[in-house]
Image: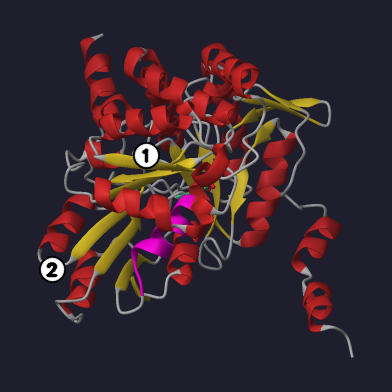
Amino acid sequence: MTNPILKRAEDFMEARLLKKAGVYPFFRPMSSSEGAHVEFEGRELIMIGSNNYLGLTNDIRVKKAGHDAIERFGTGCTGSRFLNGNSVLHDQLEAELSTFLGKEDTLVFATGFMTNYAAIGTLVEEGDYILSDNENHASIIAGCKASLAQTIVYRHNDTTDLRAKLALLPPGAAKLIVTDAVFSMTGEIADLADIVQVKKQFPNTFLLIDDAHGLGVLGKEGRGTADSFGLAGEVDFICATFSKSFASLGGFIAGDATVIDYLRHKARAFMFSAALPPASAACALKVLELLQTDPQILQRLWKSVHRAREGYEALALSFVPSLTPILSIRVGDERKALLLVKELFANGIFATPVMYPAVPFGHALIRTSYMATHSKSDIDHVLSVLETLKKPFDLEANDLPHQLPQAHTYAFEEFQEAQNAN
Ligand SMILES: Cc1ncc(COP(=O)(O)O)c(C=O)c1O
């Protein structure tokens, strides 16, 4: 009899079928990258499939910070922060993030995934409850599974459902509401104002947001989604990652000092895993500094995002309404999404498909995202290619006009004011 482990692997056909059909869109090995442009098989492509919103992975100031840290500390920590891998850079990063976010303390992890996994998995225990949005990131789901608490999934961004579900729970039990602040596949922003109101109606209830895609983008100086709503003080825990706007690697949770210190000494995935390399910490520290000293970075980002979104609207493309750099084009059929990605590739554009199980089957998207370092001609090229592909791929909006959600994004409004002033 075949070993069931082997049988499962043999039965997994999807990747092999996509490769055979010539539409496998994953693990594409780039031979170099300068952020907005990448090299692949000898061709230069415009990158509209990254999370490098500020385009700082190749910023000379950020790279120098990384180089300097390597000179000072070497390439790795080779041990857990708990025992033998901590550095002054890790401590400095935690202190500066706490100030930036207006929180008492912060704990830095080696990745954003690990942050959610370890923090959620440790904060709540048997007898507690997690209320989790049904479109939350995989790392949140992993954290929910790692904890012994009962996870109750509420309908996406639906505070009526959240309230109804909380009302059924024992008042004395601990409850943790967990949501992505910006949903990674669509760029939708969580309805934080309402979520905070709901939270306040129930005793022993904390709110944790994952601001992976809002940090460095939304809010004053990129302080994130909670700041953009003026609600940083009402959100108990802010998690995020350095692997997106922060042009590095790593993650963190910020919040109440006593709870953060508890995690520092209890979160096993943190304690028994090697520390974030000092160079990664140094790059994140530099981005934090740049956000507060170089306002042009955010202005450039919003200029790109506006140009792209106005272009999508002018082309009447069907895309998910979003106030973030993520503009996801609705395609629907999974095969069509794969073929469209291939066609974009052939036209010098690197974009990513979002398919089941990341979205419901038959609701495939092409996730596009715009960066501070995209030039006008980059965006114009993407728009001209999309114009030629919209009919053959049936990408035109056929429903109501795109309504932008009622969210407050400081950078967005500031940009509009600056535009009006000119
Ligand atoms: C919403 C969200 N949370 C967490 C993560 C994980 O972050 P990292 O890449 O740092 O592990 C991601 C990355 O894909 C994300 O999109």
Residue at image location 58% in from the left, 13% down from the top = 64
Residue 66 vs residue 379, the one in the foreground: 66
Q: Is residue 182 left or right of residue 30?
A: left
State which mark lies toward you, 2 or 1.
Answer: 2
Q: Magenta span covers which residues?
A: 115-125
In the rendered image of this protein, does residue 221 appear above or below residue 258? above
Please say whether residue 30 is one of the residues in the magenta stretch.
no
> Within 10 angstroms of label 1, few (less than 14), some, or many (20 or more) residues?
many
In the rendered view of the protein, which quadrant contains the N terminus? bottom right
Q: Is residue 326 left or right of residue 128?
A: right
What is the x, y in percent for residue 325? 43, 35
Residue at image location 44% in from the left, 24% down from the top = 285
Residue at image location 53% in from the left, 29% down from the top = 247
Residue closest to the far right: 1
Which residue bears the numbered disc 1?
214
Residue closest to the far bottom: 1
What is the x, y in percent for residue 395? 53, 48
Helix or strand or loop: what does disc 2 sit on?
loop
Which amino acid lies under the numbered mark 1 shown in the image of this protein? Gly
Residue 129 vs residue 381, the one in the foreground: 129
Q: Which mark is residue 202?
A: 2
> Within 10 angstroms of label 2, few (less than 14), some, or many (20 or more) residues?
some
Question: Is residue 137 something one can see in this rendering?
Answer: no
Residue closest to the far left: 201
Please say whether residue 124 is one of the residues in the magenta stretch.
yes
Which amino acid lies under the numbered mark 2 shown in the image of this protein? Phe
Q: Give the alpha-carbon distance from disc 2 to disc 1, as whole Å.
A: 27 Å
Helix or strand or loop: what does disc 1 sit on?
loop
Based on the displayed image, in which of its 4 quarters is residue 124 positioned? bottom left
